[in-house]
Image (spheres, grey):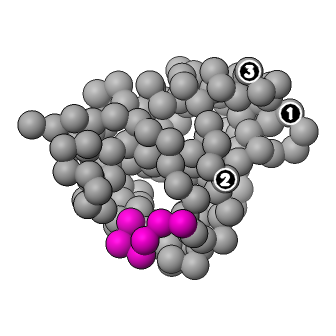
Amino acid sequence: MTDIQWVYGLKPESMTLQWRQRIIDLFLSETQEVYQDSSLINLAIPEWDGNLMLIDRSTYPKASSLKGILWCKPFMEDSVRVLAFVIDKTFQSKGYGGNAWKFMTGKMKNQGKKHVQLEVKCSNIDAQNFYRVRGMEIIRRIDLYYKTEHGYMMRGDL
């Protein structure tokens, strides 16, 4: 039996190599993007309301219990930037992403943030639709933002 829940996350540099590798594997399987361990550590994600991990509590503390992450950082004076949002395919379209988004945006509003910004692959229509439903819009295309293709910058109000 699974017990899937969003919990507050650790800073990437505080995680074991196995946990960071699980995140790298999630990105590869769900986005086809290749990340290095040093890239995760250099993101400098704080331990705060914008650092969430989707965990299967029935298999925790194994690294395989990690089913998704949502990593945000304060950005400019009144905004938050989503640096990473990925959920294992098995757990997509079950409300987990929407629940994390709602939690994060509510907390950010309470902290006085007014906007959210992120980048998404031009080919990732499902993600773009997810963000549009939540009030975000494409601001501009960023040529070769990703290793394999262009990206869109999306922005919205919290």
Label 1 or label 2, whichever lies nearer to me, is 2
Cα separation, mark 1 vs mark 2, equals 17 Å
Relative height, residue 103 to residue 120 (above, below): above
The residue under label 3 is 110
Q: Secondary structure at mark 2?
A: loop
Cα separation, mark 2 vs mark 3, equals 17 Å
Left or right: 65 in relation to 111? left
Mark 1 near mark 2, Cβ–Cβ under 8 Å?
A: no
Bin the neighbour count of mark 2 within 10 Å (Cα to Cα): few under 14, some 14-19, many 20 and up: some
Q: Residue at x 42, y 75 (%)?
A: 17
The residue under label 1 is 78
Q: Residue at x 51, y 78 (%)?
A: 36
Q: Residue at x 57, y 69 (%)?
A: 13
The numbered mark, 1 or 3, whose residue comes first in the sequence reads 1
Q: Which residues are magenta?
A: 14-19
Left or right: 81 in relation to 101? right
Which amino acid type corresponds to the residue marked 2 in the rendered image? Answer: Pro
Residue 29 visible in the displayed image: no
Bin the neighbour count of mark 3 within 10 Å (Cα to Cα): few under 14, some 14-19, many 20 and up: few
> Is most of the magenta stretch helix, strand or loop?
helix
Q: Is residue 15 magenta?
A: yes
Q: Residue at x 50, y 49 (%)?
A: 9
The numbered mark, 1 or 2, whose residue comes first in the sequence reads 2
Q: Secondary structure at mark 3?
A: helix
Give the number of the disc on residue 46: 2
Label 1 or label 3, whichever lies nearer to me, is 3
Q: Quadrant of residue 63?
A: bottom left
Residue 130 in the image, given as x and y percentages of width and height = 48, 30
